[in-house]
Image (spheres, coloured by chain):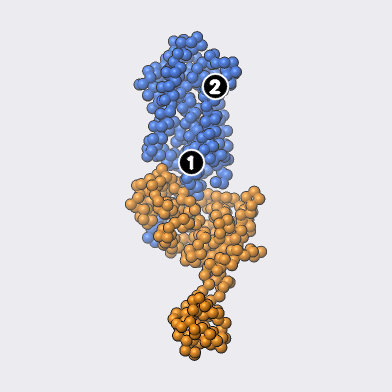
Amino acid sequence: MTTAIVEPTLTRQPWRGTGIGRQIVILTGRSLRALISDPKLVIFSVLQPLIMLLLFSQVFSSIAQTASFPAGVTYINYLMPAILITTGVGASLQSGIGLVTDMKNGVLARLRSLPLDSSSVLVARGLSDLIRTAIQLVILLTAAVVLFDFSPTGGLTGVLFAFLLALAVSWSLSWVFIAVGTWLRNAESMQSLGFLAMFPLMFASSAFVPLDGMPGWLRVIATVNPLTYAVDASRNLALAMPVGSGVVAALALAAGLTVVGIVTAVRGFKRPL
Amino acid sequence: MNDVMIEASNVSKTFDDVTALDGVDVRVPRGTVLGLLGHNGAGKTTLVNVLTTMLPPTSGTAKVAGFDVLRQGHEVRGRIGLTGQFAAVDEQLSGTDNLILIARLLGAGRREARVRAGELMDLFGLSDAAKRLAKTYSGGMRRRLDLAASLVGRPDVIFLDEPTTGLDPESRAGMWGIVEELIGDGTTVLLTTQYLEEADRLADAITVLSAGRVVASGTAAELKAQVGTRAVHVTLARPHDAPAAISSLERHGLHPVHDEPRAAVSTPVNASADIAVVVRAMDDVGVEVAELAFTEPSLDDVYLTLAKSKPAA
């Protein structure tokens, strides 16, 4: 036993740390392993948007008959590109909650005692959640095509672009929630805050009904709601409609949020636990 | 080679208006064990956090393994192992995978990491649970896994922050055994504890911390010499012999007291040679002795006298 604790088994060199690239790869793999060992996480995260898809496609389908609705578009084709975005937004909240959970259960305490770069833990969190969200969206899209006859005019290319846009939005908001998490450090508050922020944003937007059908005051809010830009952009891509500046605005906003989020998160992360 | 592995000079730490550490000096030579003894809130964990780069000190300097904790935190973290009061393990991973993760983050290759993890799981008696998720582990198993995690990189210095708090007696004994083997390997250890028995058994030197200040330091024997005295307790076979025993002891220059409920007489002594004097004193007057005991002051006495006393300025 004596030799085994101190004497290196295979190498004579002690281990003192590794480069930031490898740190990120290893830590991202660590977070993703939780998905394999506990696939419930993915199943539940897909279930919620699926239920929304089922409910809304039934409840709101008559909207497709109204004058303000784009002609010749079925409600499912209208709804699904928006669901991609709202699911991406919902998933981003989980990034912040995941980080806070790691803080609580001691994983972060262990990682902080190791010779790691402080940003690698955060970047790995963001990356693993991006991959998880991508898996979620692919399952959701498959279900929409198979179960709900989702067949947008933009075809595979349009859907692919909408999918990538949803990932960009999710990635940027992940950073916002990771940043909030490093400062707030409480999963319950994160959950309430996320819910409070997300619910009005989702409904006061073009996600489920066209803006023209809304009462005046709500239309004002929905017009300035950043989610509306993202939803419109996603929808235009999927439905092969003129894209215009919407995509640029959505991507610019996402890039801005990412930068602010990363800077704030790294600063917050350095605060003692 | 640096011979002082932990050196804190005049370290203070203030949280808002609470002073957690107030000018603490600590020196731990290579290969020795320092026991940091104190109540809850004495500042033990804060000192560990400063030395392990988790918290910046408000003032003062500290070096671990020759590196400054403020300016060379990365180097320090590459040479230390930290086991806190709460097991820091990833519940979503198996025990082995927890250790592999750390080995890989420290720069080990896949194969090396797996070998090292297997080795440590064996050493800590966790092989049977190697593939189980850590969330299924008992408290004692988590602690062992946590300690194993802090040893993955074969650190030069190990910080054990109350490693046995909350463990059942059997797990505690097991933990002691593990720590003793680490010590045998020549690793430098800083151990915080509220248990006197633990510090007495494991530490080469003891520092008593109270309200953020060092109130005493030295070897267990030195601390014991500072407080309390040695004594000989004589339990009498016939309780009514007590007056005769007392007067005989006094004639031999000792200062006995009568412990009536226990039918005993006890007397402070200066050296163990005085035991012979006590035996002769009893023999002189024909007092029959049922039991004779020589007691050293316990670390409890040290703790009660020093940790509660006003800090020596």
- Residue at (49%, 66%) from the top-left corner? B200
Q: From this viewpoint, is residue A242 visible?
A: yes
Give the class, few, some or many, for how many residues have Cα within 10 Å of label 2's Cα (few <14, many ≥20): many
Q: Position of residue A265 (x, y in %)?
A: 55, 38
**Vertical placement of B198 versus A237: above or below?**
below
Q: Is residue B163 visible?
A: no
Q: Which chain is blue?
A: A
* Relative height, residue B147 to residue A250 (above, below): below
Residue ID for mark 1: A101
Instruction: Give me the disc on residue A19.
Output: none
Residue depicted at x 64% and y 52%: B18
Q: What residue do we see at 52% from left, 28% from top?
A: A198
Q: CA distance from mark 1 to mark 2?
A: 30 Å
Along the polypeptide, which appears first: circle 1 or circle 2? 1
Give the residue type at disc 2.
Answer: Ala
Residue A204 numbered mark, or none:
2
What quarter of the picture does the C terminus of chain B occupy? Answer: bottom right
Relative to the observer, which residue lies in front, B131 or B156?
Answer: B131
Dots 1, 2 in contact, CB < 8 A:
no
Residues behind callouts 1 and 2 on a single chain: yes
Report the amino acid beneath label 1: Thr
Horizontal and vertical percent position of residue A120: 50, 41
Chain ID, mark 2: A
- Label 1 crowd (10 A; few <14 / some 14-19 / many >=20): some
What secondary structure is marked by label 1?
helix
Q: Which chain is orange?
A: B
